[in-house]
Amino acid sequence: MTIASAQLHIDVEEGERWRRTVSVTVPADVVQQERDVVVKKLASRVRLPGFRKGKVPTSVVERQYGQELQKETLDRVIGEAYRTAIAEKALQPISQGEVQNVDYKPEADLTFQVSFDVRPEIAVAHLGGFKVTRPRVQIAPAQVDLVIDRLRDQNSLWRPIEDGGKAQEGELVTVRITPLDAEGKPEGEPQGYQMVVGDGDAIPDVESAIMKLAPGSGGDFTIRFPMDSPDANKRGTEQKVHIDLVDRRLKELPALDDEFAKTLGDFESVDALRARAQSDMEAEANAEADASVNTQLIDLVVDANPFEVPISMVERYVQSLLGDTSKADPDAVAQARDQIRPEAERGVKRILVIDHVADAKELHATPEELEARLAEIAAMSKTTPAKARASLQKANRLEALEREITERKVMEFLRGQSDIQAEN
């Protein structure tokens, strides 16, 4: 059905935080016309005893399905009248419309209200003149040493220990643990485990018991589960177990030499490896420094141009931060919502400011810029731009890539409007 705006009486009430309530009156004859259509459609397909399909009188259909007809009629009329009303008033809802105060009696006008949020129309006048400090980027040799040490640790080997001694902290051990009943008899099959002693992979009493054993030996122990055990039913309880120590292994780091460097990639020497690590760390630190400048700038713009944001946008942002909460404790979720809502509201303001600047200064990503970025991604992935585009489209990431380009252009513009100083 189509309802012309001239057939309706439409009022718009402005609420807080960009809330709008549209009140609509639909003439009785318009409602009746749609009800007639609904009745005829139902009569054409309904089957009732004593009537052939499609030959059921509308009066019979009305008596038999009056309540269902009323609901379907109102749903259709309200939906169409709502769409006509927001188009007539040039409103752009950003939240689901909440239908309320529906009032209708046969042969009378239909009235209803729909409340929703609209996109804020913000005025951002103060975009520059700020002073922002860029964090200093300096990678110390000790930081590079830590990266090299981590690479050595990741490429280490665990060598068997044959001295016959007891297990020590830092060793990788293989054990078999069998639960025992109150009389010390096995309550199941032994379960094998591997763990690094002292790393917290096992509860303290188990680690303590393991360090009393040498490979090939075993013993019975009573262990107590700590009060922070993941299994709430075991917290503070005791369990008898039998533990057998199968073997001990000690971590052996590779020598820090040119041969080690060559195993990690296209490096001819340790010096080349260190140089790459230094370069990568500087690039990461520079990216973090740039991100800090961007955050400072956009926050200064937000603070200099105060405005209210729709509650629905904040709630969607909160939900995006929380993720799936369907299985979480409702009280904990409510508490988390309250805690992150202020930052969520600020996040929404940042988004709206960026969108406003992009619109006002015509800084949205162009097709050419998008293609250039796709070519970069394709080169890094060793594929074609067409395949890169298809992959992003399939993952619903193409729009995010466009926004990334737009945000970069906006931040470049804002940087040009303020004084960016290096940290002393």
Image (cartoon, grey):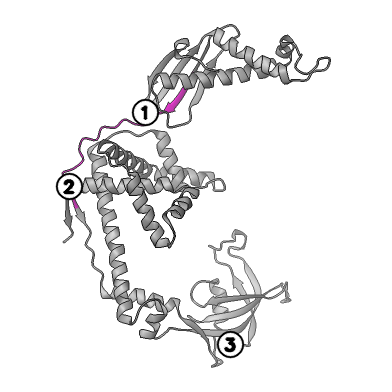
Foreground label between 2 and 3: 2
Q: Residues within 10 Å of mark 2 (few under 14, many from 20)?
A: some
Residue at 57% over, 75% down: 206
Q: Amino acid at mark 3?
A: Ala
Q: CA distance from mark 3 to mark 1?
A: 72 Å
Per the image, the residue denoted by label 3 is 214
Residue at 51% over, 23% down: 99
In terms of secondary structure, where does tag 1 sit?
Answer: helix
Point out which mark residue 418 bears. Answer: 2
Visible in this render: residue 360?
A: yes
Q: Kindly indicate whether the residue at mark 1 contacts the one at mark 3 (C-beta within 8 angstroms).
A: no
Q: Kindly indicate whether the residue at mark 3 contacts the one at mark 2 (C-beta within 8 angstroms).
A: no
Q: Amino acid at mark 2?
A: Ser
Q: Seen in the image, is 199 located left or right of residue 408?
A: right
Q: Seen in the image, is 52 located left or right of residue 223?
A: right
Q: CA distance from mark 2 to mark 1?
A: 31 Å
Magenta range: 113-132
Quarter occupied by the C terminus? bottom left
Per the image, the residue denoted by label 1 is 18
Based on the picture, tell me whether residue 262 belongs to the magenta stretch.
no
Q: Amino acid at mark 1?
A: Trp
Based on the picture, tell me whether residue 114 belongs to the magenta stretch.
yes
Visible in this render: residue 257?
A: no
Residue at 53% over, 9% down: 109
Q: Seen in the image, is 390 located left or right of residue 262?
A: right
Tally of marks: 3
Residue 271 in the image, given as x and y percentages of width and height: 30, 80
